[in-house]
Image (cartoon, rainbow, N blue to C red):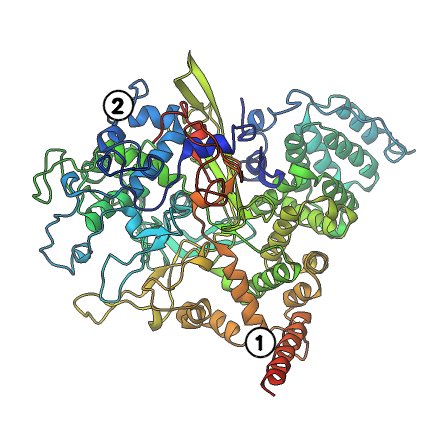
């Protein structure tokens, strides 16, 4: 018996999140498994334990996390507290609550809603890297396939940027090898297609992702190097092409003598 | 509610081969050739034309009707549409006989040749609704395009239209807006700008790439037709001399009504110019050949449903790391040359009307020796019993009829299509003359979707260009800068661009292994005996995209 490769199986589960907005498709998206389970309130870890001088936000966050099903309130609080530097641990707890959701579609929907609602420029966001790495850890198996479709279909700028960064992070991590061949190829194609549409501040990480996924040539081409030969940069593929050509010519010459 | 049902666990391999049967392009139905000695029952269409018509259009409770089958046994409808597409029509069934008199300038279709099967023009690779014909004759010729992904194109055109019109509707009097739509992957498509000048009036002077009515028409090189249904009814008439009366088209085109076809396409005759059927009633013999109702509505329904679901093209970057790198580099060079500004790689459909998708990729391990591709079919819903009998089932989440709150909209990312659904001027090298040699030739053409381009030479709407490299260099006009960027690349880089485009391919469904029928080197005899005599692998057991296993009754073959 043959089965569908896992790479594309659950694509549809993902797309409605950005296209149709959070919540619209929830009944469908979450139905396949654990659909009625809300997020489990995470234990307050060392990283998220209230610090002295900020009891109110943390206690609020703890209460919100205890009512784990109310993701709208969590998302709102996460965004509303973004201007308060002291609220970072509390906001991290809120993220942890969203990430504790068992259903991957629900988890992504609320997480990306929170990311989008936060008005802080990513470069100034103390939790940005945490968000990116948290997303990157989700990209395994079918979730990776769905996530790659999310990258394409997500139109909200901040959520979209976080998704792209998360896959760029994945490309540079050992977890890349956990994707199957078809998934790695799709990720490479996706990164190539997106590369020309990312903001300038994101180009470096995309360049490095392309290098990891497709080698130095891919990164160089993205940077406009070695395309025409006029810039003096020679792509590795150009070297190989000319070497193969020279080798063939030598063999032909040898055969004709 | 179930959102997705995968086709894993389906009875595969040998059973599919036995039940699905072999098939090729342009088939006769076996009941027409039973007088032939040793006719192979596995090598033709099992139902004759009246059986394909069945109980007519009917309704959800009319067993054997097109509405019933589309909604309760959808894989059968798709298969029936396919068999109709491959059918070689006979004179006695209305084929040919079309009156070709008239003004070829005002009705260029009368210059069309005559072919006895849809597959006569759309038949390569073997058994597919592919490319290969040149029937609709203009002075400069028109190549028949492949029909892979046709339903996705119809839906994309329709959704882009809705988005453009939503922008228009949002305008206050005196207000101007850019007609820009976001289509996924960060790409936007801009159709110029529009200004509201009154309650119902607009200045459309700056609208580009689409008619002033903002209706994207994805079909034909010049962007002339909105829907699959119009396209197929028109082609049956123009290319095959078969006139079908269709009440849906009649209601939309002539009675200016808004009509939803059985495949879920809304024909807004109250807003759009819809093409009328070639005859105004089932009693009209349009070509005077003594036969009326040559294409009953039920057949149009099945054909539309089939084409809505027609497979996307495949991607085949290969398995050799050097080859994959070449393809990926070529893709990046293509994007870097800004080819992707019109040939947009990936687009998103907000609400997919199809019941299934087929993803086909290079897979040396699971593919067969013919093409080393493997297709994975995936249903978007579940077939459930609604009346408690095996033969009366309904397709849960089938959007064709159940567009209710209980059936949510669904999105789909269309990858590797490479089009922007917009008309462009590519310079005089692409202009097309009309029959009267007017001084103003056809100058605007829809961006050709590049999926499948690796297996559909020759190129250009007119088939005048023999290779991918030459057709790139043929570009001018709006694409001049991209063309020049390609021309300036090193030889090795040009080769990589071509390698990338050659990885976008078509495939024959009968010759492509799938999760419906995988490779099985030892298939059983369809008659229940031992191994098939004189048919060793891969002539037998190579797998196929065989829908038969999904029928309510797999023993009732199409």
Q: Which mark is residue B529?
A: none
User: Chain for mark 2?
Assistant: B
Q: Secondary structure at mark 2?
A: loop
Q: Which mark is residue B58?
A: 2
**Nearer-N-terminus badge (1/2):** 2
* Residue B196 in sight: no
Nearer to the camera, B67 or A246: A246
Q: Quadrant of residue B492?
A: bottom right
Q: Secondary structure at mark 1?
A: loop
Please name the residue that numbered disc 1 is placed on.
B490
User: Chain for mark 1?
Assistant: B
Can you give x and y, in whole percent of width and height, for residue A24 in the image?
A: 54, 30
Nearer to the camera, A217 or B7: B7
Image point (30%, 53%), residue name: B121
Q: Residues within 10 Å of mark 1 (few under 14, many from 20)?
A: some
Instruction: Give the Cα distance between marks 1 and 2.
Output: 61 Å
* Residue A194 in sight: yes
Image point (64%, 65%), residue name: A222
Can you give x and y, in whole percent of width and height, for residue B482 in the image?
A: 49, 69
Nearer to the camera, A34 or A94: A34
């Amino acid at each position: 018996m043959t089965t569908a490769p896992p790479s594309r199986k659950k694509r549809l589960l993902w797309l409605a999140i950005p296209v149709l907005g959070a919540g619209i498709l929830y009944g469908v998206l979450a139905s396949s498994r654990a659909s009625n389970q809300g997020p489990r309130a995470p234990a307050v870890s060392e990283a998220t334990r209230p610090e002295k001088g900020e009891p109110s936000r943390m206690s609020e966050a703890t209460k919100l996390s205890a009512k784990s099903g109310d993701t709208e309130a969590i998302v709102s609080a996460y965004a509303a507290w973004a201007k308060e530097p002291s609220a970072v641990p509390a906001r991290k707890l809120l993220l942890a609550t969203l990430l504790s959701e068992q259903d991957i579609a629900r988890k992504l929907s609320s997480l990306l809603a929170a990311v989008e609602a936060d008005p802080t420029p990513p470069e100034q966001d103390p939790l940005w890297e945490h968000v990116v790495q948290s997303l990157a850890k989700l990209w395994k198996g079918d979730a990776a396939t769905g996530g790659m479709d999310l990258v394409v279909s997500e139109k909200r700028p901040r959520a979209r940027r976080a998704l792209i960064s998360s896959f760029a992070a994945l490309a540079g991590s050992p977890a890349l090898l956990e994707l199957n061949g078809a998934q790695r190829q799709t990720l490479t194609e996706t990164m190539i297609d997106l590369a020309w549409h990312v903001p300038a501040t994101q180009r470096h990480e995309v360049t490095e992702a392309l290098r990891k996924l497709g080698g130095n040539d891919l990164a160089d081409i993205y940077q406009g190097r070695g395309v025409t030969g006029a810039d003096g940069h020679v792509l590795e593929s150009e070297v190989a092409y000319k070497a193969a050509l020279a080798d063939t010519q030598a063999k032909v010459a040898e055969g004709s003598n | 509610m179930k959102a997705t049902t995968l086709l894993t666990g389906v009875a595969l391999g040998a059973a599919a081969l036995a039940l699905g049967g072999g098939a090729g392009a342009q088939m006769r139905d076996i009941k027409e050739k039973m007088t032939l000695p040793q006719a192979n029952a596995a090598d033709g269409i099992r139902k004759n034309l009246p059986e394909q018509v069945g109980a007519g259009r009917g309704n959800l409770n009319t067993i054997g009707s097109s509405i019933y089958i589309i909604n309760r046994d959808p894989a059968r409808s798709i298969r029936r549409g396919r068999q109709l597409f491959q059918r070689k029509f006979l004179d006695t069934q209305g084929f040919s006989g079309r009156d070709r008199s008239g003004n070829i300038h005002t009705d260029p279709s009368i210059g069309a040749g005559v072919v006895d099967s849809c597959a006569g023009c759309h038949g390569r690779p073997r058994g597919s609704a592919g490319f290969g014909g040149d029937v609709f004759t203009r002075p400069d010729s028109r190549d028949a395009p492949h029909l892979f992904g046709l339903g996705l194109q119809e839906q994309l055109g329709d959704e882009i239209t809705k988005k453009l019109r939503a922008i228009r509707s949002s305008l206050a009097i005196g207000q101007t807006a850019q007609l820009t739509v976001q289509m996924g992957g960060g790409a936007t498509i801009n159709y110029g700008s529009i200004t509201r000048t009154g309650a119902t009036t607009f200045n459309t002077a700056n609208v580009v790439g689409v008619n002033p009515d903002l209706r994207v028409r994805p079909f034909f090189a010049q962007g002339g037709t909105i829907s699959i249904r119009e396209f197929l009814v028109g082609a049956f008439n123009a290319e095959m001399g078969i006139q079908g009366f269709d009440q849906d088209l009649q209601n939309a085109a002539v009675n200016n009504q808004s009509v939803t076809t059985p495949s879920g396409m809304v024909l807004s005759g109250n807003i759009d110019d819809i093409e009328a059927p070639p005859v105004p009633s089932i009693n009209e013999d349009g070509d005077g050949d003594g036969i009326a109702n040559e294409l009953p509505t039920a057949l149009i329904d099945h054909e539309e449903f089939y084409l809505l679901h027609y497979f996307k093209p495949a991607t085949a970057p290969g398995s050799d790391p050097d080859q994959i790198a070449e393809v990926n580099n070529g893709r990046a060079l293509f994007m870097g040359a800004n080819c992707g500004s019109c040939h947009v790689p990936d687009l998103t459909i907000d609400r997919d009307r199809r019941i299934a998708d087929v993803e086909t990729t290079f897979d040396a391990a699971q593919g067969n020796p013919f093409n080393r591709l493997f297709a994975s079919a995936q249903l978007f819903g579940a077939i459930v019993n609604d009346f408690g009998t095996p033969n009366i089932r309904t397709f849960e989440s089938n959007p064709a009829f159940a567009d209710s709150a209980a059936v949510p909209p669904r999105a789909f990312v269309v990858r590797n299509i490479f089009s922007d659904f917009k008309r462009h001027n590519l310079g005089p090298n692409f202009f097309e003359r009309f029959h009267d040699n007017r001084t103003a030739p056809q100058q605007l053409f829809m961006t050709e979707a590049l999926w499948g381009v690796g297996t559909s030479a020759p190129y250009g709407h007119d088939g005048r260009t023999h290779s991918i490299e030459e057709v790139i260099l043929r570009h001018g006009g709006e694409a001049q800068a991209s063309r020049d960027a390609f021309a300036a690349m090193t030889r090795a880089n040009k080769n990589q661009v071509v390698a990338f485009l050659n990885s976008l391919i078509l495939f024959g469904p009968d010759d492509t292994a799938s999760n419906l029928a995988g490779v099985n080197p030892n298939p059983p005899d369809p008659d229940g005996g031992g191994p098939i005599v004189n048919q060793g692998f891969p002539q037998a057991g190579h797998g196929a995209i065989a829908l038969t296993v999904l029928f309510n009754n797999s023993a009732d073959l199409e």
